[in-house]
Image (cartoon, rainbow, N blue to C red):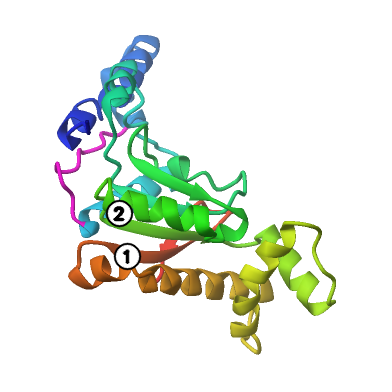
């Protein structure tokens, strides 16, 4: 049984309210508490891809400003999610510990379906999970989240340029990134970041071409977008 989205968002302000009250008690000022923890508006029951994308943009703006709303993190909300889930976006990201999607987009429990592999490589498991999200959970938005200074990208470039095979299963990552290395050849600027962007764009194209996802994308039921996270600023820039 899947919990209606309205129920999931019923307690979206709970985390913010609790934090605000605690801060007010310490500071003796409700105005200070309100300023410290912004209100996070609830999404509609069945958000469109555009509404889901805007929620991520707004959440990232709060993260960049160091003013997170901490939505959907109450004990009541956590308990309600035992009956089911209805996340509003899928994020395919890198395993890098500096790029946790829930923090980067200031979201909480039940908000995001997250798939993470080094350099956001989409293997069979990640593709199957993404398809499950779109078909079984009705998620309208898929975001491919790359980031600058990616160690996996650097390692893949080194392995290809020196013709040195990566050890064991790591080579599967190198082979997945190899087309992006070729696509970025000759481009001006930072080599690593050029390959990362090309890899993000190719991953978006891969998802759009999937035989299950393609009809949903064509029908406008699902949107697939690429994005880049900047490690220094915390800002996510959406591509296209």
Which range of residues does the magenta coloring cover?
A: 38-48
Q: Is residue 81 left or right of residue 196?
A: left
- Front one among 16 and 130: 130
Q: Point out the image quarter for the N terminus.
A: top left
**Residue 172 coordinates in the image, percent (x, y):** 68, 63
Q: Residue furthest bottom?
A: 186
**Residue 182 coordinates in the image, percent (x, y):** 64, 83
**Residue 165 coordinates in the image, percent (x, y):** 82, 68
Task: Categorize mark 2 by other alpha carbons within 10 Å: few (<14), some (14-19), many (20+).
Answer: many
Task: Categorize mark 1 by other alpha carbons within 10 Å: few (<14), some (14-19), many (20+).
Answer: many
Q: Are marks 2 and 1 in contact (CB under 8 Å)?
A: yes
What residue is disc 1 on? 213
Whether residue 44 is in magenta: the answer is yes
Q: Secondary structure at mark 1?
A: helix
- Front one among 216 and 64: 216
Q: Is residue 35 above or below residue 204?
A: above
Q: Residue at x 23, y 25 (%)?
A: 11
- Front one among 57 and 175: 175
What residue is disc 2 on? 134
Within the image, what quadrant is residue 78 found in? top left
Q: Point out the image quarter for the C terminus.
A: bottom left
Within the image, what quadrant is residue 225 found in? bottom left
């Amino acid at each position: 049984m899947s919990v209606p989205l309205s129920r999931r968002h019923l307690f979206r302000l709970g985390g913010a309210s609790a934090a605000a009250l605690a801060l007010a008690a310490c500071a003796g000022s409700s105005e200070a508490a309100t300023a410290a923890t912004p209100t996070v508006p609830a999404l509609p029951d069945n958000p469109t891809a555009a509404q889901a994308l805007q929620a991520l943009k707004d959440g990232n703006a709060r993260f960049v400003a160091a003013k997170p709303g901490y939505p959907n993190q109450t004990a009541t909300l956590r308990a309600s999610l035992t009956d089911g889930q209805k996340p509003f976006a899928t994020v395919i990201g890198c395993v890098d510990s500096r790029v946790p999607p829930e923090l980067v987009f200031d979201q909480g429990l039940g908000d995001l379906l997250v798939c993470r592999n080094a350099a956001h490589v989409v293997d069979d498991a990640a593709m199957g999970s993404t398809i499950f999200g779109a078909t079984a959970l009705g998620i309208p938005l898929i975001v491919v989240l790359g980031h600058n200074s990616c160690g996996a990208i650097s390692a893949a470039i080194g392995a290809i340029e020196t013709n040195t095979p990566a050890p064991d299963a790591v080579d599967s990552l190198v082979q997945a990134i190899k087309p992006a290395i070729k696509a970025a050849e000759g481009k001006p600027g930072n080599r690593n970041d050029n390959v990362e962007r090309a890899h993000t764009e190719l991953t978006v194209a891969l998802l759009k071409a999937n035989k299950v996802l393609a009809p949903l994308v064509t029908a406008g039921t699902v949107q697939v977008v690429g994005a880049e996270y900047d490690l220094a600023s915390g800002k996510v820039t959406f591509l296209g």
